C-alpha cells in the first residue's frame, strides 16, 4: 500500500472523482494494517522478557511469533471469500474489533499457553486487515482514490520501528505494554470505521459459494510455507525441520492451483497470476519489498551489535527514510506524469540498485547520519516503483475483483518477504561468522544491488502506458 494511490478503472472516463478521504476515515483504514504489521515485528524484542516473567522456555514463547505468522497465513486464505460473502467493510470492521479484543487477551495472559492462543487469534484477526483496507483505498466502486503522504510514512515506518517501539514500551511498562497500546488505538479505529461510507468498499457478491476443499488446501499450503520459512530463519535452511514443511506446503499449494482451475468460485481466484502484466507487477513489487526491507532489517542489527549504539539510535536512523517515502509520493505526481509505467519502475529499481551500493561504505565507525542518508536514498525508489506497479496490477480489474487481487498480492508479498529476507539474513549471518560483520554487510549490499538490477531489467517487459496512478486531481 502506498501513500498516494489513484488508480483509474476501465469505464471511469468522465466520472467524477470522490473527495479526498477525511482524517477520520483514513485513520480507520490505516490503523488496522499498521497495528497488524507492527505486531509482526514488535514481538522479536519481547520473547526473552516474556519467557523470564512467565517462567517458560524460549522455545515455547517463540510460538507467540510463529503462531501469529502461521495464523496470518491461514487467515489470508479465507479473506477473499469472506469479503465476497459478507462485504468488504463489515469484514474489515469485525477484524479490527477482533484484533483489539485479542490484543487485550494477550496483555492479560496469565501463562505462555494462553498467550500463544491469544496470539493465534490475533493473527487470524489481522489477516484481512491489509488486503481489505487496500480494496477500499484503491477504489471499491471504480473511482480513483487519494490518501495523504502521511499514510505512506506511517505504513513504511511502522514495521521498521516495531522493534525500537517495542523495546521502549517494554522498558517503560513491561512486555504487556506492547499489547495494551493496541487496545485504545484499535478501539478508536473500530469506532472510526463506522464513519467510512459503505459506497467506498466492494459489497457482497450475490451467490458467493464456500469452497471448503480449496480453503483447506490453500490454508494448509500457506501454513506449511510460512512455517518452513520461520524454521529456516531459526534452525537453518538445510535442516529437515525446514524442508519438510516447505515441501508439504509447496505440494498443497500446487494441488490448490490445480483445484482452482476447475472451480467457478475458488477460495482465492488465481486467474490474475496467469496474466503476464499483473503477474510481473506482483513479482516486481515483491522484489522491491525484499530489497528494501532486507536493509531495514539488517542495518539496525548492525548498528546495535557492531557499532554498540542503542535501540533508540537505531530507530532514529530509520526516520528519514519514512519522511523521504512520503515526499517521493508527493513529488512524483508532479514530475513523472509524462513518463510511462515502464520507465518509472525501471528508474526506481535503478535508484534502488545504486543506493544499495551505499552499504559498501558502512563500517564499524560509520556515522549514524551517513547510514540514515543511505537508507533515505534507497526509500526514494518506493514512490517510483510501487504506485505504477499497483496501477498495472489493478487497472484491468472490475471493482468486485479487487478483494481477490489484493488478497493474492498480500499473500505473495508475505511469502516472498519471508523467504527473501530470511535467506539474505542467513547469508549475512553465515558471512559474519566466517569473515566478520562488516564484510558480510558489504556482500549483502552487493547482492541487494544485483537483485535490484535484475528488477530493472524485468521492468523492460512492463507496458509503455502513461502513469495515471501518478496523476493529480
Image: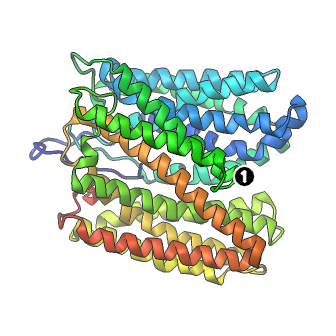
Residue drawn at the location 47% of the way across and 36% of the way down: 221
Q: Residue 226: x percent and y percent?
A: 55, 42
**442 on left or right of 194:** right
* Closer-to-camera residue (446/91): 446
Q: Secondary structure at mark 1?
A: helix
Q: Residue 50: x percent and y percent?
A: 83, 35
Q: Residue furthest top?
A: 207
**112 on left or right of 369:** right
* Closer-to-camera residue (273/449): 273
In the figure, 149 relative to 439: above or below?
above
Q: Residue furthest bottom?
A: 361
Q: How is the image coloured?
A: rainbow
**343 on left or right of 240:** left
Q: Residue 133: x percent and y percent?
A: 41, 36
Residue drawn at the location 90% of the way across and 36% of the way down: 52
Residue drawn at the location 49% of the way across and 40% of the way down: 249
User: Which residue, given by chain and number where applicable, does mark 1 sit on?
Assistant: 164
Within-10-Å neighbours for mark 1: few <14, some 14–19, many 20+:
many
Can residue 23 be seen at all in this image of the molecule?
no
Q: How many marks?
A: 1
Residue drawn at the location 31% of the way across and 57% of the way down: 281
* Closer-to-camera residue (349/321): 349
Q: Residue 275: x percent and y percent?
A: 22, 50
Can residue 234 be seen at all in this image of the molecule?
yes
Amino acid at each position: 500500500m502506498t501513500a498516494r494511490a489513484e488508480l483509474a478503472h476501465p469505464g471511469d472516463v468522465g466520472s467524477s472523482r470522490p473527495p479526498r478521504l477525511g482524517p477520520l476515515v483514513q485513520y480507520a483504514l490505516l490503523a488496522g494494517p499498521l497495528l497488524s504489521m507492527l505486531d509482526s515485528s514488535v514481538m522479536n524484542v519481547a520473547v526473552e522478557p516474556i519467557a523470564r516473567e512467565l517462567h517458560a522456555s524460549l522455545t515455547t514463547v517463540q510460538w507467540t511469533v510463529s503462531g501469529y505468522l502461521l495464523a496470518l497465513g491461514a487467515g489470508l486464505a479465507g479473506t477473499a471469500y469472506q469479503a465476497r460473502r459478507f462485504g468488504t467493510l463489515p469484514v474489515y470492521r469485525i477484524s479490527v474489533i477482533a484484533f483489539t479484543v485479542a490484543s487485550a487477551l494477550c496483555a492479560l495472559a496469565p501463562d505462555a499457553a494462553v498467550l500463544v492462543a491469544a496470539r493465534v487469534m490475533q493473527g487470524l484477526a489481522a489477516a484481512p486487515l491489509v488486503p481489505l483496507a487496500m480494496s477500499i483505498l484503491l477504489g471499491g466502486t471504480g473511482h480513483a482514490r487519494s490518501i495523504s503522504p502521511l499514510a505512506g510514512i506511517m505504513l513504511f515506518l511502522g514495521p521498521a520501528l516495531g522493534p525500537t517501539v517495542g523495546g521502549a514500551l517494554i522498558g517503560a511498562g513491561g512486555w504487556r505494554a506492547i499489547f495494551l497500546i493496541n487496545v485504545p488505538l484499535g478501539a478508536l479505529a473500530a469506532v472510526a470505521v463506522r464513519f467510512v461510507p459503505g459506497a467506498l468498499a466492494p459489497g457482497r457478491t450475490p451467490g458467493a459459494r464456500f469452497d471448503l476443499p480449496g480453503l483447506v488446501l490453500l490454508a494448509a499450503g500457506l501454513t506449511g510455507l510460512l512455517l518452513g520459512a520461520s524454521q529456516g530463519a531459526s534452525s537453518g535452511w538445510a535442516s529437515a525441520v525446514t524442508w519438510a514443511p516447505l515441501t508439504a506446503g509447496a505440494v498443497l499449494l500446487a494441488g490448490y492451483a490445480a483445484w482452482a482451475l476447475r472451480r467457478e468460485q475458488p477460495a482465492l481466484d488465481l486467474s490474475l497470476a496467469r496474466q503476464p502484466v499483473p503477474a510481473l507487477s506482483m513479482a516486481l513489487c515483491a522484489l522491491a519489498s525484499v530489497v528494501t526491507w532486507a536493509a531495514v532489517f539488517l542495518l539496525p542489527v548492525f548498528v546495535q551489535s557492531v557499532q554498540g549504539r542503542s535501540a533508540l539510535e537505531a530507530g532514529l536512523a530509520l526516520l528519514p527514510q519514512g519522511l523521504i517515502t512520503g515526499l517521493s509520493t508527493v513529488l512524483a505526481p508532479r514530475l513523472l506524469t509524462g513518463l510511462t509505467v515502464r520507465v518509472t519502475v525501471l528508474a526506481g529499481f535503478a535508484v534502488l540498485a545504486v543506493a544499495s551500493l551505499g552499504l559498501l561504505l558502512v563500517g564499524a565507525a560509520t556515522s549514524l547520519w551517513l547510514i540514515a542518508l543511505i537508507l533515505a536514498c534507497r526509500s526514494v525508489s518506493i514512490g517510483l516503483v510501487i504506485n505504477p506497479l499497483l496501477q498495472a496490477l489493478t487497472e484491468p480489474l472490475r471493482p468486485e475483483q479487487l478483494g481477490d487481487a489484493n488478497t493474492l498480492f498480500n499473500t505473495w508479498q508475505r511469502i516472498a518477504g519471508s523467504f527473501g529476507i530470511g535467506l539474505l539474513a542467513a547469508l549475512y549471518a553465515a558471512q559474519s561468522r566466517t569473515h566478520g560483520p562488516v564484510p558480510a554487510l558489504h556482500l549483502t549490499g552487493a547482492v541487494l544491488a544485483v537483485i535490484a538490477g535484475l528488477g530493472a531489467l524485468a521492468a523492460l517487459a512492463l507496458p509503455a502506458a502513461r502513469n495515471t496512478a501518478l496523476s493529480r486531481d
